[in-house]
Amino acid sequence: MKTIPSCLCRFLLIAVVFALMSMPAFAALYEGESAPVFTGHDQDGKKFKLEPKIGKEFVLLYFYPKDDTGGSIAGAVALRDRMLELKRRDVSVVGISFDKAKSLKKFSFKYNLNFPLLADTCGEITDAYGMRMWPRREMARPVSVLIDLNGKIARVTDSPDPAVQMREMETALNRLEALSSK
């Protein structure tokens, strides 16, 4: 009987650990499900409520791991640069991370962000959407969630590439707009 080499065993163990670490702590929501409503506070301490936006505009939630990191910067800047078009299409953008308001304010100022960033320091919003990186880790996965006018999740994009997220959100918006014009 052949035995498995110890280096292969270590590799498999490491692969399993990394797979478990990347799994969300809570079940992620899927397209077609009702979006959990929430209230949070942005970088300026202003209250943000999702509920009043439902039925009036699309909402794009931009979950990101940490302020001022490569992917977070690229995603935030991509949204910032498309904000005029998104507003024209009745899309409200909201960034969400575990960072504190003070950090969010610095991040927003440094990159001239033109949308609110919510301080989800306890992870309540992140957990409601199933976007925590893994159990007990205080970081959100880099995911965009598009909520339609009926308060349903229209698209979930979890590519780490901000360009892919933007393309997928654009395609979903085109589909939603086509459906609403019929």
Image (tube, rainbow, N blue to C red):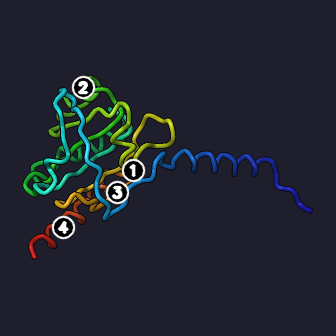
Q: Amino acid at mark 1?
A: Pro
Q: Secondary structure at mark 4?
A: helix
- For residue 178, which quarter of the picture? bottom left
| x, y percent for residue 68 | 33, 32
User: How many residues crowd mark 4 within 10 Å: few (<14), some (14–19), many (20+)?
Assistant: some
Q: Quick one: SS at disc 1?
A: loop
Observer-nearest of 61 and 27: 27
- Can I make out residue 168 in this image? no
> Disc 4 versus disc 2: distance between alpha carbons?
34 Å
- For badge 4, the amino acid type reads Leu
> Where does the image place residue 174, in percent across and percent down from the top left?
18, 67
Compare marks 2 and 3 and give the one earlier in the sequence: 2
Q: Residues within 10 Å of mark 3 (few under 14, many from 20)?
A: some
Residue 4 appears in the figure = yes
Q: Which residue is located at x 36 percent, y 52 percent?
A: 161
| For discs 2 and 3, the disc positioned in front in the rendered view | 3
How far, Cα to Cα, is label 2 from label 3? 26 Å
Choose the circle earlier in sequence order: 3 or 4. Answer: 3
Pointer 4: what residue?
Answer: 176
> Disc 2 marks which residue?
106
Return the residue at label 3: 157
Q: Secondary structure at mark 2?
A: helix
Residue toward you, 70 or 2: 2
The span from disc 2 to disc 1 (Cα, nearest Å) is 23 Å
Q: Residue at x 38, y 32 (%)?
A: 122
Q: Earlier in the sequence, mark 2 or mark 1?
A: 2
Amino acid type, callout 2: Lys
Q: Nearer the viewer, mark 4 or mark 2?
A: 4
Question: Which residue corresponds to mark 1?
Answer: 160
Position of residue 23 measured from the top left corner of the image (x, y, whole percent): 51, 49
Q: Considering the numbered disc 3 on the image, is that residue within a helix, a strand or a loop?
A: strand
